[in-house]
Amino acid sequence: MNAIEYADQAGEIFVLSDSFIRIKELIDDESSTIDDISDVILVDPALSGTILKLANSSFFNYPGKIDTISKAVLVLGITEVYNLVIAYFTTQAFESVNAEQEYLDNFWEESVDCALLIKFFGCSLNIANAERLFILGLLHNLGELIVKQISAEKVAECQRGVDSKLPWDSQRDVLGFTYGECGAELLKLWQLPYNLVSPIRNQDEEDFSLVNAETELLYIAKRIMSQHRSIKLAGQPQSVKVAQLSTLGIHEEMFRTALDYCDLERLGILSVLSPTSVTIY
């Protein structure tokens, strides 16, 4: 099976709710108002609660209290609220994945770490609307859950190869594609924006001249996350080259501060998006 075939099967298992589809339609409709979008969000109390918790978290660092969905849309912007909606419904859709809880807790922790790192680098490098980068990091590895659901033994085989290879190289050897390419195909089926699908598909492209800034940052953030969490694997090759960091303007102090920021914010995000993950702390 190739990446598209995996995604086609996953599309029948992991389905976004009708509420998401309606919110997407409203956001795509230029005549829609903030109240129109807010009204649909309010129909789902769990979604509303998640958005308000994240909107009032230190992640956004808004000085006042955001106590209504309308205010959240007004203060954060439609695009940012849409990203929070995507985050919520994606984690909900994958709740049904057939995997051990420990595995899922670790998966979402790594995804949140990558999301926090790419957001931090984007803000530090003055990328416009850098908060939106968070969703790229959060969704970057959904392909692993797709393969886990359909061919769990393939994930195990990929994992066995990471002692001497980088994870994405092991994925190509075992599957013929990377988790990023597979996840991008599902996001495409879900009709998510191209500016989300493309960086996730191309997150392992080493030639930065072929990709945009968001894809470059995802490439770096994922590798830093992977390297940081796999430090015990002494035989694993280095995944980030100094020249690549320099190209983006990422220096050693920024690197260290990014990891500190990740440690500081991880628990708060996990407690909202994946509450069971916080039990490991």
Image (cartoon, helix red, strand yellow):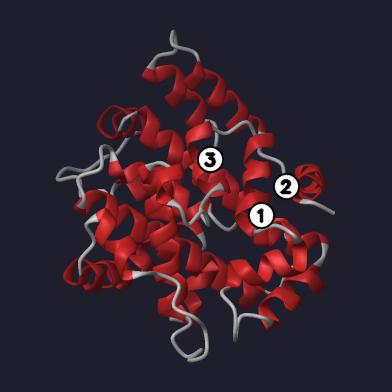
Residue underneath mark 1: 94
Q: Which mark is residue 60?
A: none
Q: Identify the residue at the far right of this view.
A: 1
Answer few, some or many: residues within 10 Å of disc 1's Cα (few below 14, many 20 plus, some between 14 and 19): some
As drawn, 2 above or below 104:
above
Percent of width and height locating residue 124: 20, 53
Do the CB atoms of the residues marked 2 and 1 lie less than 8 Å apart?
A: yes
User: Which label sits on residue 198?
Assistant: 3
In the rendered structure, are the residues bearing label 1 and label 3 in contact, judged by CB atoms less than 8 Å apart? no
Q: Is mark 3 on a helix, strand or loop?
A: helix
Amino acid, disc 3 = Ser
Q: Which residue is drawn at 66% across and 54% down?
A: 94
The answer to which of marks 2 and 3 sits earlier in the sequence is: 2
Please provide percent x and percent y for residue 59.
28, 54
> Of label 1 and label 3, which has the lower sequence position?
1
Asked whether residue 48 is in view, the answer is: no
Q: In this view, does 133 lie above or below 190?
A: below
Q: Position of residue 113 (x, y in %)?
A: 41, 65
Q: In this view, does 140 lie to the left or right of 229?
A: right
Q: How far apart are marks 2 and 3 (CA)?
A: 20 Å
The answer, for residue 152, to whether it is visible in the render is yes
Which quadrant, please, contains the C terminus?
bottom left
| Real-space CA distance between mark 2 and mark 1, rounded to the nearest whole angstrom | 6 Å
Q: Identify the residue position indicated by label 2 in the image.
A: 14
- Left or right of 174, for residue 115: left
